[in-house]
Image (cartoon, grey):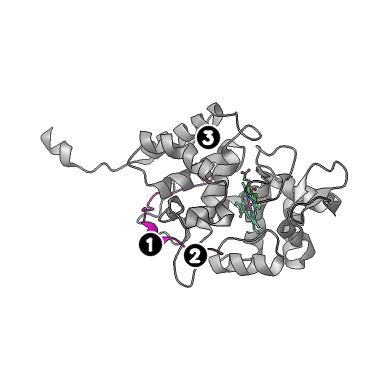
Amino acid sequence: SASSLNKPFVPTQADYQKVYDAVAARLSDETDYDDGSYGPVLVRLAWHASGTYDKETGTGGSNGATMRFAPESDHGANAGLKTARDFLDPIKAQFPWITYSDLWTLAGACAIQELGGPTIPWRPGREDRDVAACTPDGRLPDAAKDQRHIRDIFSRMGFDDREMVALIGAHALGRCHTDRSGFDGPWNFSPTVFTNEFFRLLAEENWIQKKWNGPKQFTDKSTGTLMMLPTDMALMKDKGFKKHVERYAKDSDVFFKEFSDVFVKLLELGVPFKTEDRFVFKTSE
Ligand code: HEM
């Protein structure tokens, strides 16, 4: 009818599930990358889009998707994330009604689920902002630093010790690239499967400083092929952090539950939602 022409399109859960399905399909089609999946770099995009949040000023966070613009896209911490943004361009073209900021966070939730992680309930409502909303450099963590830095950065977002440790458990996924961060290698042998392996290895392996010309990082004594960042090692040096590393190393279910809760919280920091209800997306077969 003529009147329906002017009705704004109001997407439902089924529409967002279609976006989820399109991201999941693209993940399973595009395996000629890194360890065989764009999933890890999508998780990193969602995290870096969200982790700029500052609870004092209410600035930053996933609302806005300001990493589309320089200077934020050029911040050192965001090196390599163009790969993830480009991966999602065909999805944005297919579903032009979704904002970039909803799409990036939805894709992060999708990647966690598709790689075997816990369900990540998600809700829409983010709006894209322009270049003026770019956050200043220095809000994301520096891997060369210690536990004090981890607490400074993550308490600025509003997280406690337990939540900080759970979040960093995402380092079960993916790897470091010398041409992005300068660091090199994966944290475990299955970097495209979401597990508690990061914590098990951190707690149980013998980690020694890697001998190379690159930035200081650690390698496992038994194979010399895995890696830990200085900030990862700091989780074992600090009593308040270590008890959670050990809990998660022992109990995968506890890690999955606590990771899901804190990742949901991360993706929602600073977003003025109009709805309380979250969607639980169906994972692909
Ligand atoms: C990768 C640092 C917390 C998810 C990386 C890399 C660095 C890093 C240096 C390698 C980037 C590259 O060379 O490609 C840190 C530091 C953290 C932290 C210092 C906190 C102290 C987190 C959190 C998440 C996360 C909270 C998600 C919840 C990832 C993922 C990758 C990654 C999935 C792999 C990306 C890929 O394979 O391309 N991180 N990270 N990280 N990070 Fe973190």
Specify the quadrant that holds the N terminus: top left
Question: Quick one: 55 or 77, which is closer to the camera?
Answer: 77
Residue at numbered disc 3: 283
Q: Is residue 131 shown in magenta?
A: yes
Query: Residue at the spot x=42%, y=59% of the render?
Result: 271
Callout 1 amino acid: Ala
Instruction: Look at the numbered disc 2 and give the secondary structure of its residue.
Output: loop
Query: Residue at the spot x=84%, y=49% of the render?
Result: 205
Pair 3/2: label in front: 2
Residue at numbered disc 2: 136
Mark 3 and ligand 1: say if the CB distance to the nearest ligand atom is below 8 Å.
no
Range of the magenta residues?
119-137
Residue at numbered disc 1: 132
Q: Earlier in the sequence, mark 3 or mark 2?
A: 2
On the image, the x and y values in percent for residue 139 come to: 55, 64
Instruction: Look at the numbered disc 1 and give the secondary structure of its residue.
Output: helix
State whether residue 51 appears in this view. yes
Callout 2 amino acid: Pro
State whether residue 186 appears in this view. no
Query: Residue at the spot x=85%, y=53% of the render?
Result: 208
On the image, the x and y values in percent for residue 85 come to: 48, 43
Q: Residues within 10 Å of mark 1 (few under 14, many from 20)?
A: few
Q: Are marks 1 and 2 in contact (CB under 8 Å)?
A: no
Instruction: Look at the numbered disc 3 and give the secondary structure of its residue.
Output: loop
Quick check: 220 left or right of 149? right
Q: CA distance from mark 3 to mark 2?
A: 36 Å
Name the main secondary structure of what is drawn in magenta: loop
Residue 59: quadrant of the picture: bottom left
Residue 70: quadrant of the picture: bottom left
Quick check: 236 left or right of 74? right
On the image, the x and y values in percent for residue 162 come to: 66, 62
